[in-house]
Image (spheres, rainbow, N blue to C red):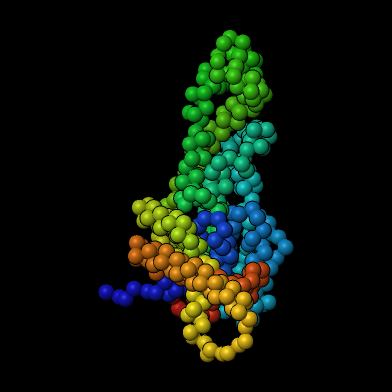
């Protein structure tokens, strides 16, 4: 049996051979930075890479040293970061535009121009198309399917949105489809669902309690817009559901992979552990853990250096000693939490130390990658690319 790859080697191979890498994790752990750093490393190794973020904040643009990104792929000038990338290597970046992606799906699946106009012009749709629970995750999966069908890119790195629940990215689209299932609204508005404005008015006067309550608190126009939206959407539901199924199947293929980014705190690692367990249950291909912002043990650093005498005031020495002890306690607690992750998953994570500066350009991203892998980006080798 072949020896098991180290976590750095496993992730390096994934960057060289996979078609999709999905960076997941809770908010505030540096997930967007990690996704950008992985994409940059793959591009410098000779692959054509697109990194797409779902997070509407400017973190990805800031990490790349840009003022902003849009919903269109933008080429990143890698000549600013010597040495130049291997032959063929290139990097693009973009931000998911949920509203335009939703509009494009509506345009694709509406049976005729009139139906398309009814949905795109519907006030309920205009207000909720980018705000529905699960819409960000569903549209991210839709965009992922679209991007992977575009042969301009060898690798797509998807930075998922920060979530409170580890599996929101995978499960939220199903919740969205449940909401859009017209049977839900049929139950609420029956038998007035297919009625026009006049019939809804009659219904409110004839004693339908649910309709009268909705009319009182939401307004009759809202009910009209809501019913028109669901009636028009009914013809598109199967198309939306079929696309979601295709993405779920795509994410289970060997050409895909999940990278879990976590912080070193016990709570963040507990969520990472849960996520890994659920990925395994769903048959999703896991690649590696990246534990970011790990604090080093200052006592080890002191012992590894040559000690020098210094005249330090007693009060200052006492404060420095207390700070040293606090840092030791923090570093050891993090190491214990990481050790538990290793034991429970049998996966050794890549550890990225806490930096004393923010990452706001390509050099910072390259430094992140070097710290995670322990070496600069490798030159390309003749390897089979998973498709």
Q: Where is residue 298 in the image (x, y as percent from the top left)?
A: 51, 77
- 98 and 152: which is toward the camera: 98
Is residue 63 in view from this perspective? yes
Residue sitting farthest toward the right: 67
**Residue 260, above or below 352:** above
Residue sitting farthest toward the front: 314
Horizontally, residue 114 falls left or right of residue 267, namely: right
- 18 and 336: which is toward the camera: 336
Horizontally, residue 65 falls left or right of residue 271, namely: right
Please tell me in which quadrant of the rendered image residue 85 appears: bottom right
Q: Which residue is drawn at 56% across and 53% down?
A: 161
Q: Residue at x 40, y 54 (%)?
A: 274
Is residue 113 in view from this perspective? no
Please tell me in which quadrant of the rendered image residue 60 appears: bottom right
Q: Which quadrant is home to the C terminus?
A: bottom left
**Residue 221, above or below 134:** above
Horizontally, residue 260 falls left or right of residue 132, namely: left
Q: Which quadrant is home to the N terminus?
A: bottom left
Q: Which residue is drawn at 36% across and 62% down?
A: 345
């Amino acid at each position: 049996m072949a020896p098991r790859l180290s976590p750095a080697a496993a992730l390096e191979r994934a960057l060289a051979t996979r078609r999709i890498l999905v960076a997941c994790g809770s908010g505030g752990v540096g997930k967007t930075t990690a996704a950008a750093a992985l994409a940059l490393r793959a591009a410098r190794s000779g692959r054509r890479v697109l990194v797409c973020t779902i997070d509407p904040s400017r973190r990805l643009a800031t990490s790349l040293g840009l003022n902003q990104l849009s919903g269109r792929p933008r080429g990143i000038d890698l000549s600013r970061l010597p040495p130049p990338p291997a032959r063929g290597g290139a990097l693009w970046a973009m931000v998911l535009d949920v509203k335009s992606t939703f509009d494009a799906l509506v345009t694709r699946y509406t049976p005729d121009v009139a139906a398309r106009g009814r949905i795109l012009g519907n006030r309920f749709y205009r207000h909720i198309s980018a705000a529905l629970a699960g819409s960000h995750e569903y549209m991210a999966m839709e965009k992922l399917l679209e991007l992977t069908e575009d042969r301009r890119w060898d690798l797509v790195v998807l930075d998922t949105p920060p979530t409170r629940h580890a599996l929101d990215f995978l499960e939220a689209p199903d919740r969205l489809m449940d909401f859009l299932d017209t049977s839900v609204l049929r139950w609420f508005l029956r038998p007035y669902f297919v009625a026009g404005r006049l019939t809804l008015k009659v219904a409110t006067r004839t004693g339908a309690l649910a309709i009268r309550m909705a009319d009182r608190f939401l307004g009759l126009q809202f009910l009209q817009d809501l019913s028109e939206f669901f009636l028009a959407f009914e013809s598109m539901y199967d198309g939306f559901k079929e696309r979601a199924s295709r993405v779920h199947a795509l994410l289970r293929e060997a050409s895909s992979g999940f990278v879990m980014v976590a912080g070193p705190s016990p709570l963040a690692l507990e969520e990472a552990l849960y996520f890994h367990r659920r990925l395994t249950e769903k048959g999703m291909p896991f690649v590696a853990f990246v534990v970011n912002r790990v604090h080093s043990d200052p006592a080890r650093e002191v012992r590894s250096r040559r000690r020098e005498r210094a005249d330090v005031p007693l009060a200052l020495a006492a404060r420095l000693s207390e700070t040293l002890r606090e840092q030791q306690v923090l570093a050891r607690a993090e190491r214990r939490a990481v050790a538990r992750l290793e034991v429970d998953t049998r996966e050794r994570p890549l550890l990225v130390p806490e930096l004393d500066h923010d990452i706001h350009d390509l050099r910072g991203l390259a430094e992140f990658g070097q710290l995670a892998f322990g070496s600069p980006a490798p030159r390309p080798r003749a390897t089979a690319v998973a498709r």
